[in-house]
Image (tube, rainbow, N blue to C red):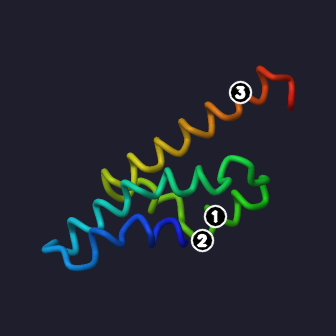
Amino acid sequence: MHCLQMALVTDAIGAATTCRTLEDYAFGTHAGCYIDNGLCTLGIHNWLVILEIVDIKTLFASWDAFLATVEAVADCAEFYAFIIAKGLF
């Protein structure tokens, strides 16, 4: 949560922006924050909890949500490929 908040500070404070612009920017920062904070290393139980809370429909509710989802999936796939290639799995 802290990463998401910090990513928005400069755009949210003192800037002439709309709620929609800020929302779009926020979705653009989600994947990086999640990846940087260990999303790919979560166990299956945690993934199921996330999907229960967020709801799969939300992940594809808008173009920005879709792009953030695809980016996170791609980054995790890259991480898993690295782990497998190094024989760590």
Name the residue furthest bottom: 14
Residue 33 % position (x, y): 52, 57
- Is tag 2's residue or tag 3's residue first in the polypeptide sequence? 2
Residue 53's tag is 2
Instruction: Say whether marks 2 and 1 touch (CB < 8 Å).
Output: yes
Q: Amino acid at mark 3?
A: Phe
Per the image, label 3 sits on a secondary structure element best described as: helix
What's the CA distance linking mark 2 and mark 3? Answer: 29 Å
Residue 65's tag is none
Residue 82's tag is 3
Q: Residues within 10 Å of mark 2 (few under 14, many from 20)?
A: few
Per the image, label 2 sits on a secondary structure element best described as: helix
> Which residue occupies 36% across, 72% down?
9
Residue 50's tag is 1
Looking at the rendered image, the quarter that the C terminus falls into is top right
Per the image, label 1 sits on a secondary structure element best described as: helix
